[in-house]
Image (cartoon, helix red, strand yellow):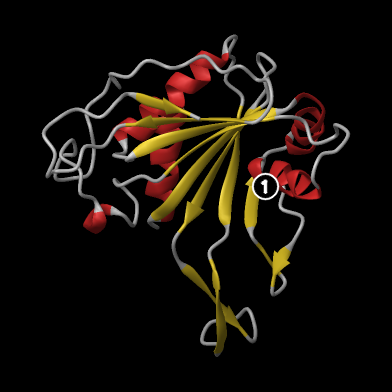
């Protein structure tokens, strides 16, 4: 799967550093994936859309949501691709969250918002500006499916191409904040049966000399 390549392509085209990355999927084979990149930066808001117009304020650069239409049969393939991207880009860990459908009886109202957020379908704006720029034509259908069947997200903070390079205390990273592929950690099969969180830990503090476990499940 070309998750890493799509992330690197977006970084090259925007020239902005990343704060974090989210990948979302519904547990149904061959459905699209939604990749959301959260940027660090501010855009100028002017009185008029002309050169030289006075800047009245700055607004955060919206996140970018992309639809990935690559075919897959097993969630472990998506899990592995997310781990490879996080590993290569120097993330300290990759966290996978398994969420039940929010249409079930007794579901909290915040779960609906979290489901929309995972697939880049933010229902709100900030000072009239969109929080996400979405290129995901099937996002609405995916949200409906996720609300009924549940969904999974993978999140990580890249060191390479991100804002974390000066703060990274990780003995596994190159000077560029990257690691060589392949990722040496094996995916843990998701259960897709309620709330569950799995954290794949990659980083090792420079002060420590013993290995960190490949994954922690809560």
Q: Residue furthest top?
A: 73
Q: Position of residue 197 (x, y in %)?
A: 54, 31
Question: Taking 56 as reference, is 179 above or below it?
Answer: above
The one of 140 and 192 positioned closer to us in this rendering: 192
**Would you call the spot at circle 1 few (<14 residues within 10 Å), some (14-19), or many (20 or more)?**
some
Left or right of 147 in this view: 63: left
Left or right of 109 in this view: 218: left
Q: Position of residue 170 (x, y in %)?
A: 20, 43
Question: Which residue appears at 73% of the width and 37% of the height?
Answer: 139
Q: Quadrant of residue 83?
A: top left
Residue underneath mark 1:
117
Q: Is residue 1 visible?
A: no
Q: Secondary structure at mark 1?
A: helix
Q: Position of residue 4 (x, y in %)?
A: 40, 31
Q: Position of residue 189 (x, y in %)?
A: 52, 14
Q: Residue furthest right?
A: 105
Question: Which residue appears at 51% of the width and 87% of the height?
Answer: 52
The one of 214 and 91 positioned closer to us in this rendering: 214
Question: Which residue appears at 79% of the width and 33% of the height?
Answer: 147
The one of 86 and 198 positioned closer to us in this rendering: 198
Give the tally of numbered discs: 1
Q: Quadrant of residue 81?
A: top left
Q: Is residue 122 visible?
A: yes
Question: Taking 131 as reference, is 50 above or below it?
Answer: below
Question: Which residue appears at 77% of the width and 24% of the height?
Answer: 149
Left or right of 92 in this view: 105: right
């Amino acid at each position: 799967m070309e998750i890493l390549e799509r992330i690197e392509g977006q970084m090259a085209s925007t020239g902005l550093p990343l704060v974090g990355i989210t990948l979302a999927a519904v547990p149904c084979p061959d459905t699209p994936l939604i990749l959301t990149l959260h940027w660090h930066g501010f855009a100028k808001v002017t009185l008029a859309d002309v050169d030289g117009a006075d800047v009245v304020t700055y607004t955060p650069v919206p996140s970018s949501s992309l639809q990935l239409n690559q075919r897959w049969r097993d969630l472990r393939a998506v899990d592995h691709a997310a781990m490879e991207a996080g590993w290569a880009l120097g993330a300290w860990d990759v966290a996978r969250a398994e969420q039940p459908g929010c249409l079930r009886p007794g579901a909290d109202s915040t779960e609906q918002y979290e489901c929309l957020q995972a697939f880049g379908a933010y229902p709100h704006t900030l000072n009239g500006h969109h929080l996400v720029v979405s290129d995901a034509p099937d996002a609405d259908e995916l949200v409906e499916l996720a609300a009924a069947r549940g969904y999974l997200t993978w999140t990580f903070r890249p060191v390479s191409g991100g804002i974390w390079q000066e703060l990274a205390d990780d003995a596994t990273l190159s000077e560029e904040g990257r690691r060589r592929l392949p990722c040496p950690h094996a995916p843990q099969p998701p259960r897709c049966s309620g709330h569950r969180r799995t954290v794949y830990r990659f980083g090792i503090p420079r002060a420590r000399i013993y290995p960190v476990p490949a994954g922690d499940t809560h």
